Amino acid sequence: MCKQLTLKFRFFILVILLPVSLFGQQKSETDSLTKLLTHLEITGIKRAEILNTLGSKYSRIDSSKAFSYALLAKSISEKLNYLPGQADAYRTFGIAMAVKNNLTEALRYFNKAIQLYTAAKMETDVGIVYSDMGMTYITQNKRPEAISSLLKAEKIHRATKDSKNLLTDINQLGVSYFQSANSAKAIEYFVEAAAIADKINDKNGLSSIYNNLGLLLHGDRNFNEAKSYYLKVIALQKERNNQREMGIAYLNLANVYIDQANYKEGLLAYDNALAAFTIINFTKGIQVCYNNMGAVAIRRGKYLDAIPMLQKSLDISISSKNFTGVALTQQNLAHNYAKLEQFPRALALFKEAELSAIQYKNNATVFAEIYNHKSMLDSAMGNYQSAFTQRNKYLSIKDSMLNEKLSKQINELQTKYETEKKEGQIDLLSRQNIIQALNLKNQDLLLLQNTLTISRDKLEIDKNKLYLANQKLRLKNNQNLLVKQRLLSKARGQEIKLLNEENTNQQLQISKRNVIIFTIMGVTLLLGIIGFQGYIRYKLKQEALLQASVIHEQTQASRGIIEAEERERKRISSDLHDGIGQLLSAVKMNTEVLIEKYLNGKQEGEELGQRLLAMADESCIEVRSIAHQMTPNALLKSGLVSAVRDFVNQIPADRIRIFLEVEGLSDRMESSVETVLYRVIQESVNNVVKHAKASRIDISLISDQTEIRITVEDNGVGFNKKDSTLSSGIGLKNMHTRIEYLKGSVDISSEPGKGTLVSIYVPLL
């Protein structure tokens, strides 16, 4: 049970190991890049590249910041028609969605990035995105799709001789084939990956490969060799202070000790792994450590000690949305409660584990563990029919796995035998063919030599005869030519004089015609060019004027609508405060007089009067609250940040927790900008409170004097963007209209069960 469990989780961790660098090591770099954005002279493509770099560094640790930076980079790149900048932004979106386990959105963004990189003729980057897609498929247990994507990446990086990215592709292919139970193919890729890592002196990559080879040897029960590789990894990563890889190596080393029943060393290695993962808050590694430590406690019969560790593992899996380990942890808990003879609780957990395994598409080993342990529970409870059924399911899976393994071994041996046999036959035939070919060539050479000798003799005789005949003909021809040349020389002299005179006259006439023709053509062409340029300038000027007029009218219309809306809000707020508020105050005073004069001393009447006073007080408070929301004084007096804080503080904390982060908003902005941004934030938060069923909202307001970025993220139920009834609501349309008025953009990312992220970008210059 424990061995199968840990093997699965160790390899899941390795999939994301090689291409990811630790954010702690990037902290100084991100800080320096963020400071660069405050420099107004950094604009255009350079600014887009800095924003994309920041988005990429945050993509695996903070999706909100990643989206914020990438959205700005995408907006700038689209305005400049800068394809690489657009492609980098979409790749960042894809990685952020992959980290959030949103496969559909991640693949959509990755495919868009591939299209843009291809259009920009950036083959290496196309390969990198295919590698990202492969690792995303691996996290979703879609190994055939993962292998297909990684093979595409490998082909591109081999062609471009990109050793660094090829190392990533080869290592991940080895991982994928090992997870697919193809050890021979996995070893082939790992050996090649080790050679590449050694060639380019990539110690981090070499460490990852050592980890993978350790897993292979562990699977073959070669424990001492496996431990030696893990100790090499630990030594390498201690030098680099890479807590993640060091923790993984300790985790794998612990599993070897546990399989050797060396619990003391195994638990010590688990403690070291847990300490390393805790330093960098690597939740997946922490979850695996607690699960494995709980499984060891079960093996040692310490059932009460196992419960808190397994429960921690299960809580971390659910809270971090790493669902691949949920089923195994649930079945471990169920098996533990069965050992404690808490049968109803164990039975409920086994049912939950089976549903989780189906939902998250766990492999056959997980189902075998569940059915095996549930059959033991049913037998202990006296449910022998159910125990028999569960045992049959377990044996069926084991038999199918054994048959599959045997079939693969038989096929491999048969293929090897056939290959060796064919190679021997081919080698024998090749040797015979070479000998026959050499004999034929020798015979051909002898015939050719004889033929050449005879031909040479004949040619010599013929040459001599031809030479004599030619000499005679030349003498006769020379005599005839001398006579003809004398006669022709006189006639040609006269003809040459006449031809020279005619040629001179013709050349003069042709020159005059050419001058006239070229002059007319040049003038005509010049007039045509001048007229065409004038027409183009006039057309462009008219189009520019028309476009400017349309934009101006749209801006004026938007401004008029927003200003009219704000005036109406102020009027309603004033009417509520001065009209209904005053009336309610008068009702309260009259009720107090009524109680004092007529109901004092009368118990029932006095109680009714007190209820009327309470209702009047509550109505006054409600009217003031509505009037304040319509036109908050904090927005008019203190600005956007104070108004947002005031608005957030009015929402009950026991209903929903709201966290507000503000950066760089020390100065006031134009009142129209602050009003629009306040209304959009108010609309976003109200939507979450009314519809999202969320327990937490994260709001960030970030400004660097040139633009302002706002994100509102919740952990609610989310919604399907393809559902037109939700995505085309009045509130969302109003948000887009208001932000478009400020020349900004709004991006909403959501999926059922995944929460909602609203990202807003507004330029300030």
Image (spheres, rainbow, N blue to C red):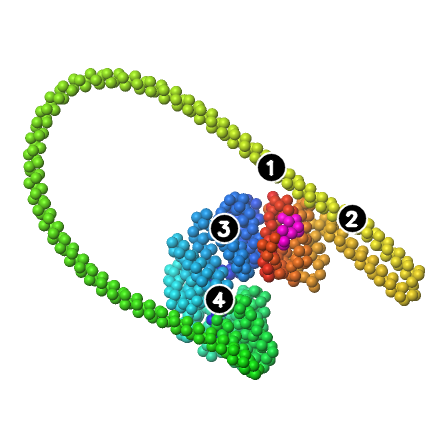
**Badge 4: few (under 14), some or many (20 or more) residues near its Cα, within 10 Å?**
many
- Whether residues under marks 3 and 4 lie with C-beta atoms below 8 angstroms apart, the answer is no
Position of 216 with respect to 693 (left or right) is left
Query: Does label 2 or label 3 sit earlier along the sequence?
Result: 3
Instruction: Answer whether residue 730 is magenta in the image.
Output: yes
Q: Position of residue 143 (x, y in %)?
A: 46, 63
Res 67 quadrant in image: bottom right
Q: Residue 471 versus residue 292: which sits nearer the camera?
A: 471
Asked whether residue 333 appears in the rendered view, the answer is: no
State the residue position of label 1. 548
User: Is disc 2 in contact with disc 4, using a CB cutoff of under 8 Å?
Assistant: no
What distance separates the C-alpha of mark 2 from that of mark 3? 51 Å
Q: Earlier in the sequence, mark 3 or mark 4?
A: 4
Question: Alpha-carbon distance for marks 1 and 3?
Answer: 31 Å
The residue tagged 2 is: 574
Relative placement, left or right, of 741 versus 218 is right
Question: Which percent across, then down, holds residue 725?
Answer: 63, 53
Q: Residue at x 54, y 67 (%)?
A: 359
Q: Residues within 10 Å of mark 3 (few under 14, many from 20)?
A: many
Assess whether residue 703 is covered by the magenta stretch. no
Residue type pointed to by label 2: Ser
Q: Which residue is mark 4?
A: 12
Separation of residues labelled 1 and 2 (CA atoms): 38 Å
Q: Residue at x 50, y 55 (%)?
A: 110
The magenta segment is 725-736
> Which mark identifies residue 397?
none
Determine which residue is flagged by label 3: 87
